[in-house]
Amino acid sequence: MKLMWFHLMPYTELPEDFNRKHPSVWVDIHSSLFDPRRAHHMYNDFMDELEYAAELGYDAICVNEHHSNGYGLMPSPNLIASSLARRTTDTALCVMGNSLALYNPPTRVAEEFAMIDCISGGRLIAGFPVGSPMDTCYAYGQNPSLLRERYLEAHDLVKRAWTEKDTFAFNGRYNQQRYVNIWPRPIQNEPHPPIWIPGGGSVETWRWCAEMDYVYCYLSYYGYKAGLATMQGFWNEMEKLGKDRNPYRAGFLQFVGVAESRQQALDLYTEPAEYFYGRCLHVDARFATPPGYTTEATQRAGIQSMVSKAANTASYSSKLSMKATNMKDIVDGGYVIVGSPDEVVEQIRNVATSLNVGHLMLLLQYGNMSKDTTKYNTRLFAEKVMPKVKDLFGEWEDKWWPKPMAKGQRAAVPPFRPQTVAAE
Amino acid sequence: MSQPVTTTIDVNGHSCRIWTKGSGPKLGFLAGLGGLPRWLPFLDRLAEGRTVIAPSLPGYPGATGHTELDTHLDWILAVRQLVDGAGLSGADLVGASVGGAFAAEMAAIFPGQVRRLALIAPFGLFDDKEPAADPWAQRKDVLPGLLCADAANWNELVAPPEGANSVEWPIEMTRASEAAARAFWPLGNTRLEKRLRLISAPTLILWGDRDALLPPSYAVKFAEGINKGNNGATRVETVGNAGHLAYLDQPDAVAKAVLGHFA
């Protein structure tokens, strides 16, 4: 299986009384809480952590896009990914992803992803999320009634921009462009970089991923227990469509905290986990359900099967209402897997096999976790957990993984040397 | 309260409901946010002396087809087809809230279509100094009080009637909100300001004094915009103890003002 290291880049210094004094971590979070000089250190710590994960042999490092968000400081994940392309060598770069409807023209995504693919020597995984209501409809003012149509059309435009050999005119419902002809073009051109789709639990998305042969990713913050119904729904749908159970058709996000013992893990990770589930997910419910964002088919499924978790977890309002914020409930709910290396191994194997997920995206930094603790968590997982879970799904081929240039053909990137060191 | 006669017309291949009741000269009504999930006491007051014709705009209760409409021009042409198809050419027209913005467009762009115009807290403008509230970013318990002075009046409008389909009813209510968002997201500003001066029909502007969504001061902006043209007959009236959907809070007072203007 693939073990991927994911960073959300949360602002780590939201005040203790944040939830009492502020209505939302997202959309209208107050500017006075943001100290750019502190953010300088946060960004550099976070990028160090991503590079460290690459050094330790994680299969991919992952970044994503959020706007006006106190737990996600990456309005442009492409900026981070381009830096990582220069500071890593073999790790896949998973940009999870660019919310296609937010780019005008969406050709921009085709270009920037092609740049990252060229700079990295073909290591890009191209994630195309619709984007959350908070990011797309509120922070970026997109019309919720048009968002999905615009997203699907933008997807068509990006894919054509990557694959068509000649300059073409794009005559879309929302985008018209006389001359589409991107330079640069992606290294991965047979036919294009792997496309992964993070989505909620809607049947439409599952069918679309199957039809297009894309990886479906369920990126919930609520762990494997809450994700089980969704992933079962996904696999049931694949079976109906006559697709095989190749676990690499799927990706799943899981928080983990590993230490020498379970008690030590609880001691280390309680504060950052409670910071994340308390302060970082303190989102004002008024930003959860812009009308039209959720399709009528999904609404119908949600109303008709109140017992079906797959449908319920598809809506942001129900996600927000889950909300356990103390460590006991967080761990009992499976949001965060904690324990000694062997305990974590057992749980990871259980998660991967019960959800049948070949791409496990790990959040090993969350909330206000310090760089030291993050590196400890990352290293211990890499040394003591990874070797005991890597063998899973060895019988399956991952057809959705980047195909970079051969190592010997890639540019040698000189090691970074700050001037003070170089002068010595 | 007897029920209106229901007919439908086709707009872009989608069925749109027309409700008709009363007798006398025709009077059209384009409803506000939420549309017309049920017939209203306000419309009964109007129907006492007039033939009230209320077409449902695409996506609002009784009508589909909002997803065909991508641009403001698409919307205006759909409303024009509805107004024509409902037999309202040249009739008096009342529009409220989101429907008010379209009623104003009809009078501005197709001056022969509208004899006299009444606007109840219409959408279409946005003033940075007095920003309108966001109807699409409200908690469920807050929204009713934003739309009506008495929250119960909104709750009564959207409550499922006896025998309603428990799955489809809430989806229809959400669809009405989506239809409004599709045309007016994110600020409610359709640049109507540029066209107000083209309105030549004598116009009455009504605004609830407790409108928590669109500031009552917007009434003056509408009147000033219309009066930049050749329309010397624009009047503004405030409706006491009424919110954004003043026709739900004060049906008698709003009907009386409208009928007086159309007399």
Image: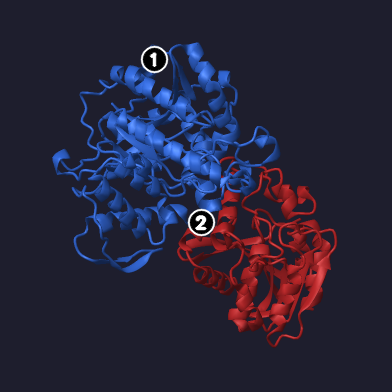
Chain colours: A blue, B red
Q: Is residue A37 above or below residue A266?
A: below
**Vertical placement of residue B27 versus A192, above or below:** below
Tag 2: residue type?
A: Gln
Q: Is residue B137 left or right of residue A117?
A: right
Question: In this figure, what is the number of numbered marks?
Answer: 2
Label 2 packing within 10 angstroms: few (<14), some (14-19), many (20+) = some
Q: Give the label, 1 or 2, closer to the camera.
A: 1
Name the residue that disc number 1 marks.
A341
Q: Nearer the viewer, residue A312 or A263?
A: A263
Foreground residue among A227 and A408 = A408
Q: Amino acid at mark 1?
A: Pro
Residue B243 location, x and y as percent? 77, 58
Kindly identify which chain the residue marked by label 2 belongs to: A
Residue A68 horizontal side relative to residue B226, left or right: left
As displayed, is residue A350 above or below residue A122?
A: above
Is residue B170 shown to the viewer in this render? yes
Secondary structure under tag 1 reads helix
Q: Quarter of the image holding residue A240?
A: top left
For the residues marked 1 and 2, what is the alpha-carbon distance in whole angstroms? 44 Å
Question: On the image, which quarter does residue A127 sit in?
Answer: top left
Q: Residue A364 lies in what quarter of the image?
A: top left
Task: Tell me what residue is drawn at x 77 percent, y 61 percent.
Answer: B246
Which element type, helix, strand or loop, lies under badge 2? loop
Residue A118 rendering spot, x and y as whole percentages: 24, 50
Seen in the image, is B261 located left or right of residue A324? right
Q: Identify residue for label 2.
A: A142
Crowdedness near tag 1: few (<14), some (14–19) or many (≥20) residues, C-alpha within 10 Å = many
Location of the C terminus of chain A (image quadrant): top left
